[in-house]
Image: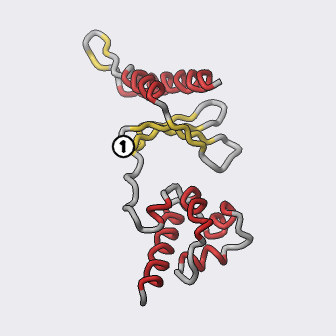
Amino acid sequence: MDEIERMKKEIGEKIKEKREKMNLSQEQLAEKLGYKSKTSIHKVEQGMTDLPQSKIIEFAKALNTSPAYLMGWIDEKIEDKKLCEISLSNGNRFEFKENNGKIKMLMKEPNKSEWQEFQFDEYEQREFEKVMGMNMLFFNGKEVAPEDKIELEKTLLTIFIKAYFNHKK
């Protein structure tokens, strides 16, 4: 196998690995990328065809990775560390994640299949850290009971989410 064939195979393996990690079928990935069928995805994953240069960024975005990772120029980015999650009464779900010191918020609305991502700026990150620090309350010198701590965290996150979106208006 020559160098070009080896590279096509490695790129295809990375795409397949990322797709499977996201629980996407070839059909679903094809749909996200605007392909009419899974055939093109299958051929790229098997190393039978090149990943079109014009599609590298689209593949990377659809697979939540970087073009540099898909091309083999860098190792996979460090996985996001999940900090906490919350479901609101309106059905919206939120996850808060940290990667390399940066915090982001993901939101999934009940009628949508995609998660929407919000990257915090420095101010928003400081405010989030303040809110999360508030759940370390003590009463009469004793730490709050675990079930009360969970309820407090949920309440504080709900307030933070409302404030965040009001701040963005």
Q: Position of residue 47 (x, y in %)?
A: 52, 81
In the rendered image, the quadrant that contains the N terminus is bottom left
Q: Residue at x 48, y 22 (%)?
A: 156
Is 89 situated left or right of 146 in this image? right
Q: Position of residue 66 (x, y in %)?
A: 48, 57
User: Farthest residue toward the bottom?
Assistant: 1
**Looking at the picture, which amino acid does disc 1 mark?**
Asn
User: Farthest residue toward the right?
Assistant: 36
Depth check: 160 or 76 in front?
76
Q: Residue at x 66, y 67 (%)?
A: 30
125 in relation to 50, above or below: above
Q: Secondary structure at mark 1?
A: loop
32 in relation to 111, above or below: below
Q: Toward which corner of the image does residue 40 lie, by quadrant?
A: bottom right
Neighbor class of circle 1 (other Cα within 10 Å; few <14, some 14-19, many 20+) is few
- The residue carrying mark 1 is 100
Q: Position of residue 20 (x, y in %)?
A: 52, 66
Q: Toward which corner of the image does residue 91 lie, by quadrant?
A: top right
Q: How many marks?
A: 1
Depth check: 66 or 147 in front?
66
Depth check: 82 or 151 in front?
82
User: Farthest residue toward the front?
Assistant: 53
Q: Residue at x 62, y 66 (%)?
A: 54
User: Farthest residue toward the top?
Assistant: 140
In the rendered image, the quadrant that contains the C terminus is top right
Q: Residue at x 62, y 70 (%)?
A: 26
112 in relation to 134, above or below: below
Q: Position of residue 41 (x, y in %)?
A: 61, 73
Q: Toward which corner of the image does residue 132 lie, by quadrant?
A: top left
